């Protein structure tokens, strides 16, 4: 199994203590996290791929959430009677899900059917557009000959095609509409799917139902979710407005132009409704994946009660989808009254990068416990730290201004670096390092970082061309040159591990691949001490590699026995993690 390099940075944290806002402590870098629990989350859907520059605003939380505007969703009471949490409104974070009793690791927090979902265009053929099940295992999926976009499994084909006919024509135009309006095609598809739901079920009861332990929410639940209109850029709003307008004017049902909400004839209001759907998608849509194939983000779904859980870079829950149902599970034991949180993003990133990603794609300034802990005592400091070059010190240089420079290339010249042990300061302004002495070459932490980033990028470019031999040489040289200068948990070192492991595997060097894989697992468990399906994937690789080594003809019996035992231990870990994250302990296929 080749591990996707991007997956390496997805990780999940253990929430060690209970109540989120007050008592919680995030362990600093010296803490050990025994009994780590598991969880996986993919990020919330980002609807526009182009990266936007978002200026950081101080105190933006104040504007983020105004408690007065929040209402409970129509189906909230039903959910509270069936699942172990209730919603409360908290200053700056809006609605929060709070445990109504003690919860055990692996327990279901909510299992929810999507109100609507949209397979991502690039993965159009991966899942059935009706049941969202994996199409790879379906012998003869059927594609709509009209739009050549919708595709169904054999079980769904007959019924799905009948309803699809009603909006097939508009589906055919979507690509063009997206192009003309410069609006994301998947976003427009999602808007269309929600508008259809609204037009078909607009007058249906607003409270959902629970069937076989799964909540089926309503479109009215969706309409009560949060949006961030104030944070959307003018360009985004304009393109969405243009796209929605074009959608409206091409809205053809059975050959007739029809109002979306049949009881509402105002064109303007309809446009507003479509725009609101776009905003709702932007803030609330969840990635849906295929559990047994690395949980790839193949579709986007709307799950109003999963959306009640706020983000934390130190979450205690994870989500995973199967078909149209998204299930959130506790990744550790959680005590009554604690807030239940998911992670919307990959967590093996420096704090500033995580915050930047959340600001850019989810439009909020993260106030989770991990981000609120002073950097100098948080494990986050290690992810972008250089080792202190002062002889015998052993401390790390922590940046004063921790910026997401990797994304924004902002001017970092104003930042200084302070050793967390000897407290000496290095500053690029005066180009001095400690005691006023000039420093040279790579000892300057700011230069070291830039050099490391460039070297890694060069190695990755070769790796991406699948030139494994050359890439391995570059990655090994990179690690040799920067290990000891950057902190062992530095994100650049971590980013080099997965491609190196894959290179070694591809080149048949299982021994080295095992060593690198163990490094990955060690780093992941230190930085994001909870488990996750990504962590399970690395354990699975490790297990596979040990088993392969045990089976090699050159391996002696005694050593083969040891490898087999190590392989079994790793696979046992995979089962344990999957049991908690997915509720089933089979090995991935
Ligand atoms: C999917 S919703 C979560 C539920 C939301 N609190 C509500 O009332 O609907 C995501 C929004 O919640 C808020 N939020 C979630 N996690 C947060 C965090 N860690 N820090 C600050 N705001 C957060 C942000 O406004 C974000 O856009």
Image: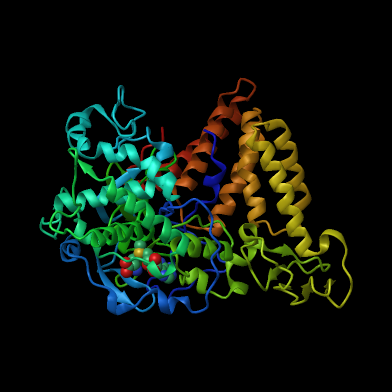
x, y (%) of residue 544? 52, 33
Q: Is residue 177 above or below residue 525?
A: above
What colouring method underlies this structural image? rainbow
Can you tell which quarter of the image residue 166 is in? top left
**Compared with residue 545, is residue 528 higher up or lower down, i.e. above or below?**
below
Count of numbered labels shown in the rendering = 0
User: Dividing the image into 4 quarters, which one contains the C terminus?
Assistant: top left
Residue for point 72% across, 63% down: 386
Q: Name, please, the residue furthest toward the top.
A: 553
Q: Is residue 17 visible?
A: no
**Residue 249 screen position, x and y as percent:** 28, 49
Q: Is residue 469 left or right of residue 115?
A: right
**In the picture shown, does residue 157 fall above or below 132?**
above
Residue 484 in the image: state x and y as whole percent: 75, 56
The residue at 39%/40% (across/down) is 175
Quadrant hosting residue 158: top left
| 203 sits to left or right of 497 | left
x, y (%) of residue 317?
Answer: 37, 58
Asked if residue 265 can be seen in this view, the reply is yes
Q: Quadrant of residue 315?
A: bottom left
Q: Which is nearer the eye, 551 or 343? A: 343
Quadrant containing ligand 1 reads bottom left
């Amino acid at each position: 199994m080749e591990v996707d390099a991007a997956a390496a940075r997805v990780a999940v944290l253990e929430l060690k203590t209970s109540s989120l806002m007050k008592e919680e402590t995030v362990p600093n870098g010296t803490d050990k996290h025994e009994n780590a629990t598991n969880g996986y989350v993919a990020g919330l859907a980002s609807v526009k791929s182009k990266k936007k520059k978002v200026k950081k605003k101080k105190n933006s939380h104040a504007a983020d959430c105004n408690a007065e505007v929040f209402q409970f969703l129509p189906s909230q009471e039903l959910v509270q009677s069936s699942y172990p949490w209730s919603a409360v409104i908290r200053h700056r974070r809006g609605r929060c899900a709070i445990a109504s009793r003690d919860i055990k690791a692996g327990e279901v927090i909510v299992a929810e059917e999507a109100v609507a979902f949209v397979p991502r265009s690039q993965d159009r053929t991966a899942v059935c557009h009706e049941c969202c099940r994996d199409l790879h295992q379906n012998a003869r999926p059927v594609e709509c000959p009209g739009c050549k976009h919708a595709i169904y499994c054999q079980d769904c084909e007959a019924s799905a095609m009948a309803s699809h006919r009603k909006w097939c024509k508009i589906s055919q135009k979507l690509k063009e509409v997206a192009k003309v309006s410069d609006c994301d095609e998947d976003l427009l598809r999602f808007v269309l799917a929600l508008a259809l739901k609204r037009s078909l079920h607009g007058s249906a009861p607003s409270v959902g139902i629970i069937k076989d332990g799964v909540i089926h929410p309503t479109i009215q639940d969706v309409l009560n979710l949060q949006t961030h209109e104030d944070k959307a850029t003018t360009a985004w709003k304009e393109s969405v407005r243009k796209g929605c307008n074009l959608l409206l004017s091409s809205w053809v049902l059975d050959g007739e132009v029809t109002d979306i909400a049949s009881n509402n004839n105002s064109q303007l209001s309809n446009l507003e409704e479509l725009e609101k759907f776009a905003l709702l998608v932007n803030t609330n849509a969840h990635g849906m994946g295929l559990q047994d194939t690395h949980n790839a983000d193949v579709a986007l779904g709307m799950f109003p009660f999963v959306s009640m859980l706020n983000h934390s870079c130190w979450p205690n829950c994870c989500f995973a989808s199967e078909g149209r149902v998204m299930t959130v599970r506790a990744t550790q034991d959680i005590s009554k009254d604690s807030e239940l949180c998911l992670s919307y993003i990959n967590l093996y990133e420096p704090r500033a990068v995580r915050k930047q990603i959340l600001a850019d794609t989810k439009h909020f300034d993260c106030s989770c416990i991990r981000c609120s802990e002073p950097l100098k005592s948080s494990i986050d400091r290690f992810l972008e730290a250089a080792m202190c070059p002062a002889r015998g010190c052993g401390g790390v240089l922590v940046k004063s201004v921790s910026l997401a420079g990797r994304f924004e290339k902002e001017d970092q010249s104003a930042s200084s670096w302070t050793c967390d042990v000897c407290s000496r300061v290095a500053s690029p302004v005066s180009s001095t390092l400690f005691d006023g002495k000039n420093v040279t070459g790579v000892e300057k932490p700011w230069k070291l970082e830039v050099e490391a980033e460039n070297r890694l990028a060069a190695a990755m470019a070769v790796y991406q061309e699948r030139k494994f031999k050359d890439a391995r040489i570059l990655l090994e040289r990179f690690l040799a040159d920067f290990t000891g200068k950057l902190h062992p948990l530095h994100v650049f070192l971590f980013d080099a591990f997965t491609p190196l492991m894959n290179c070694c595997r591809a080149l048949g060097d299982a021994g080295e691949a095992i060593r690198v894989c163990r490094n990955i697992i060690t780093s992941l468990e230190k930085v994001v001490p909870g488990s996750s399906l990504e962590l399970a994937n690395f354990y699975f690789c490790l297990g596979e590699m040990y088993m392969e080594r045990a089976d090699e003809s050159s391996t002696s019996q005694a050593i083969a026995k040891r490898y087999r035992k190590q392989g079994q231990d790793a696979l046992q870990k995979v089962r344990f993690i999957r049991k908690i994250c997915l509720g089933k302990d089979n090995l991935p296929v």
